[in-house]
Image (cartoon, rainbow, N blue to C red):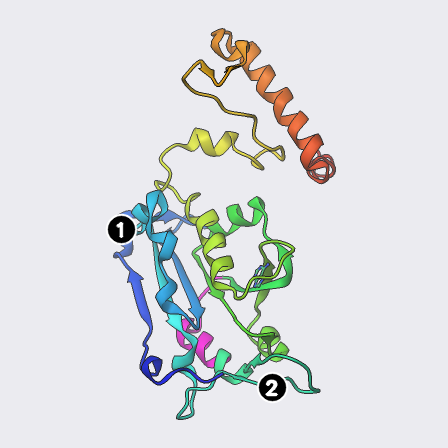
Amino acid sequence: MRPPESKNQRHAMVAFATPSCVAGHKDRNGRMTTFAATVLTLFPELFPGPLGASLVGRGLVDGRWTLEARDIRDSATDRHRTVDDTPSGGGAGMVLRADVLAAAIDAASPAGDARPRLLMSPRGRPMTQAMARELAAGPGVLIVAGRFEGVDERVIEARGLREVSIGDYVLSGGDIAAMAILDAVARLLPGVLGNAASIESESFSDGLLEYPHYTRPQMFEGRAIPEVLTSGDHGRIAAWRRAEAERLTVERRPDLLTRRRDAGN
Ligand code: ADE
């Protein structure tokens, strides 16, 4: 795929960056760090996009994390800034070249960079809340967001890319998947959400879906708030919420219960 002339001169974009001394957090080794995210993409102008809004966006401005979107095309070496080629062995679509992507990774991630490297792909391991927690406890992440049929297998091996999927459906590219992963991780960083209790009780944190929520008005189109929630009896409320969380999980995601049992909960 050749880019239109007007896009030939795009350059790496640094979305937001704040010195790490401002608002970092301790990584799993107890060292101060600011979670640093780098996305390698063919469409850097898509970032920060939704990651610039709301509490996660405020976290960027406050220096709780940094986000850099780099154009893979800047690592192409020919006049046309070509990044892909036809698949060896034939077939439909185009394949992202190993040499171009390796050069983009090397430029973004110098020797000693301890950040895990992810490749967004529908054939990857499914993203989970446990993975979000694990990433949030580390120094940051480098995410490759491809477009095209695929990425040359050799660069996946040579640069240690971990393929991750955000669900069993195919997107037109990895950028939206990268944003989903970064949103899930950034909201877990210290100081981003500002309400640790709501993180504790939300879906997946204890292997169950979240219970139903209600607020005023007391009556909406003939539907009342369940009596227990306005009873003031905290024991009954906790028991009701637990039972509802279990009911919804059985109904909608029985696979989560199996996983939970296997994890010893
Ligand atoms: N790229 C295309 N589809 C994807 C998916 N489901 N997850 C992650 N990356 C993708």
With respect to residue 205, does 33 lie above or below? below
Q: Which residue is mark 2?
A: 86
Residue 125: numbered disc: none
Picture residue at 44% right of the left edge, 70% below the top: 41
Picture residue at 63% right of the left edge, 77% below the top: 153
Alpha carbon distance from label 1 to label 2: 41 Å
Sequence order check: which comes first, mark 1 or mark 2? 1
Res 190 seen here? yes
The image quadrant that residue 77 belongs to is bottom left
The magenta stretch is 102-115
Res 137 seen here? no
Ligand 1 falls in quadrant: bottom right
110 falls in the magenta region: yes
The image quadrant that residue 166 belongs to is bottom right
Percent x, y of residue 250: 71, 31
Q: Residue furthest bottom?
A: 79
Q: How many marks?
A: 2
At mark 2, the secondary structure is: loop
Picture residue at 47% right of the left edge, 10% below the top: 230
Q: Answer yes or no: disc 2 within 8 Å of ligand 1.
A: no
Q: Residue furthest front?
A: 221
